[in-house]
Image (cartoon, grey):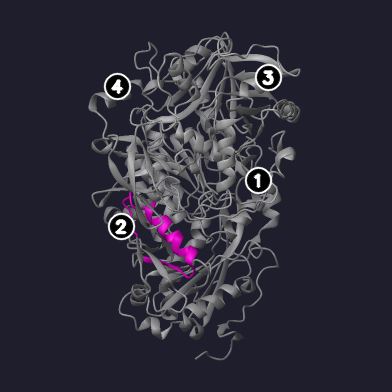
Amino acid sequence: MLRSGGQWLRGLRLPRFPPRGTPGRPRSVCSREGVRISKGFRCQDSPIPIPLPSRLLAVSSVSIRRWSVGRQTQVYIREGNPPSSAETQWKDRAETVIIGGGCVGVSLAYHLAKAGMKDVVLLEKSELTAGSTWHAVRKTPQNCLTTYFHPGINLKKIHYYSIKLYEKLEEETGQAVGFHQPGSIRIATTPVRVDEFKYQMTRTGWHATEQYIIEPEKIQEMFPLLNMNKILAGLYNPGDGHIDPYSLTMALAAGARKYGALLKYPALVTSLKPRSDGTWDVETPQGSVRANRIVNAAVQHQYVVTSSIPEVKALKRELPVLRDLEGSFYLRQERDGLLFGPYESQEKMKVQDTWVTNGVPPGFGKELFESDLDRIMEHIEIAMEMVPVLKKADIINVVNGPITYSPDILPMVGPHQGVRNYWVAVGFGYGIIHAGGVGKYLSDWILHGEPPFDLIELDPNRYGKWTTTQYTEAKARESYGFNNIVGYPKEERFAGRPTQRVSGLYKTLESKCSMGFHAGWEQPHWFYKPGQDTGYRPSFRRTNWFEPVGSEYKQVMQRVGVIDLSPFGKFNIKGQDSIRLLDHLFANVIPKVGFTNISHMLTPKGRVYAELTVSHQSPGEFLLVTGSGSELHDLRWIEEEAVRGRYDVEIKNVTDEFGVLGVAGPHARKVLQKLTSEDLSDDAFKFLQTKSLKFSNIPVTAIRISYTGELGWELYHRREDSAALYDVIMNAGQEEGIDNFGTYAMNALRLEKAFRAWGSEMNCDTNPLEAGLEYFVKLNKPADFIGKEALKQIRAKGLTRRLVCLTLATDDVDPEGNESVWWNGKVVGNTTSGSYSYSIQKSLAFAYVPIELSQVGQQVEVELLGRNYPATIIQEPLVLTEQTRNQLQKNGGKDKM
């Protein structure tokens, strides 16, 4: 029964909080029982004299903590008196300087030092655990969630490593970390959530993570306090739990010191100055440090404390962490009470507006904001319905602190393009579960010169100059509010769009199609006709785009289609060493003047870092083209190698200067020939040839290539000419029935032709031999390209897996990629991408399988939404390219489709 003396609010007793601070400004949490506590958030320790776009936003979120009152004293004392910096020495030279003493920064120091790097220095302006880690620490141990689960593929590895590290860290360092692992259950209360669980299960089967779908009866057994009326299923992860971030950070710090790292605090970084040799001068009031590289790891979450709950106290084992996805909250046991943490909607969440425009105040370290329970009341009410014993709890305290969010909710980790030897590890909305794995990931990359596995979704270079403050604010608000929404394939999020980075065709096409977001660009995914459903209808099954995409597929295969390819990343490279540089970068040979080829940049270990087309436009001058999401990722690698090898070249990013139109289909030549006097015949304009010409007096660089595999050209032109070029092509093609097509149809076409895609069939987790890219790798060319020796060793050792093409008959669902492949009752591989094949009316997918299962005709199974579908490995490609078909016809061979 609720005691008197508090405010009543629908069954939950709230305390009367004395006013502290001023409205809209941070406050400090003052002392209780003689011990002062202050908590807060720390952003970038110091500005550097290099203009980098702001891509982080501090937002205020809300969580409610419940625990027993009787044990607060020792907790307050431990957290209120953090150890001061024991190091009194100072180093004027360092291999790596890490700025920021939160959990991520300390983890990196630990991993670098443990791996043997000498002279690792960490600088923290306040004290360890200040910033996001500190307010995650809050006022009691074991209070930050840890989970093996992540909807993405690569981040599962980060979560897995973190948990395994935390399990053994106390034994290694002698420092307790307060790690509880009761497991966690995500509950589904709608059929679409059950589909989501099935979708996530197939994406987890080929990973080391344990994960199961459990029935309501099992859920009630594991969490007996639940009201089971609406619960349909649960997603259970054994080994999930919660950890004390303060103790965790101190354990990592103890390990870092043990292995020789210097952790210095308080040490405010006042300036960073890059030097011409690539090193940095790091200035602090204590002195300066010359560093070979910098890692910037410095960059409101509200909760309520209640009393003990008898029903919780009576339990014989710790409850698993509960996540109600529809109610958008988590709930876990905290001693004899419960901790409740919601994620409010984007309309109700708070942004610290002055920080958006002026940045985080320089002195901000451990302050908090005023409580604001109105924002979370709807979540509290849902939680009380789901777990009725919450109605009996008393609220003891409310804490409200900031948390950083990037536009897409993911952190930024890795080297920064355009700034030599400057690395970042910032933007962690979930820093504790990421800290261990990111520390290991970054240390391996720094020490070995390449990432240990693919993690491009965290690449800081996924943002560019188009990422304005307004965009960041809109997306951070959306991302926070979407924490627990259903994660569909082909998901689109619309806040902050369009950016300033639209193609010259945006206004022409926006009312005719469903646009997708690509590195700031808007690009047509699919087009609709009058009377068709034009809405965004996400689904785990085929939805309203399925039939229109089929029409676009037929358009390209039977007539001629036009697609906007302007988001391609585009670089000009020229200079006396340009050929030598590209010969060093690419595994393929350099094309002759006037021709193009497909080339791959490999890592030193022989993995595929990037795929680009290389066009030799004039002697020593090249146009390099990559996918939109790889623009700065690839440019950084090229620039880094140019500097390292002292190549005399000029590299210019021309992505925003040029638009690209793709024209493809059997009538493509006939349409384009109407617009130019240049001979476009097969003999005059060969496959992979590039020419500068004019279409209706519009200057164009035309390359005879198409990702559809059909007859086609990519037309590179000034961005301001896009609309005019599009109009003349569409007008010229009326007799041939010309029409638009989007990226969904192009994906279906390229899969039938067995064209690989970077980021799916190949990335930093794959080598080109297992990916079937032998044709593009010239091990016998004279130049010692990056990864050449490693590839020779891989070839000599033999492959253990191979990429294959599968067909499978499904009902209303198609592979997307990353689904589990089964054989003989066990998971043996994974798909990489998939689609519906409109030519054979079956599903089609690429997949990696063991070499012994890679023969044509081999039967396997692909798991889709909880069901295993029989699949057959086929001879690829399913459909021959236009060029191959023509060659066969010339040679009297038989055409294949």
Of circles 1 and 4, the one toward us is 1
Of circles 3 and 2, the one toward us is 3
Note whether 895 is above or below 23 in the view shown. above
Q: Amino acid at mark 4?
A: Lys
Disc 2 target residue? 167
Question: Along the horizontal axis of the image, is 680 left or right of 758?
Answer: right
State yes or no: residue 203 in magenta: yes
Q: Describe the element under mark 3 as helix, strand or loop.
A: strand
Note whether 236 is above or below 454 in the view shown. below
Mark 3 → mark 4, Cα distance in angstroms: 41 Å
Mark 1 → mark 2, Cα distance in angstroms: 53 Å
Q: Earlier in the sequence, mark 3 or mark 2?
A: 2
Mark 1 → mark 4, Cα distance in angstroms: 49 Å
Disc 4 target residue? 792
Which mark, residue 457?
none
Task: Tell me which segment is drawn in magenta.
Answer: 184-211
Give the residue at x 46% y 73%. Answer: 339
Disc 1 target residue? 528
Residue 528 image offset from top left, x and y in percent: 65, 45
Residue 777 image offset from top left, x and y in percent: 38, 21
Q: Residues within 10 Å of mark 2 (few under 14, many from 20)?
A: some
Q: Earlier in the sequence, mark 4 or mark 2?
A: 2
Q: Amino acid at mark 1?
A: Tyr
Residue 545 image offset from top left, x and y in percent: 58, 48
Mark 3 → mark 1, Cα distance in angstroms: 29 Å
Give the residue at x 48% y 40%. Answer: 456
Give the residue at x 66% y 75%. Answer: 19
Q: Earlier in the sequence, mark 1 or mark 2?
A: 2
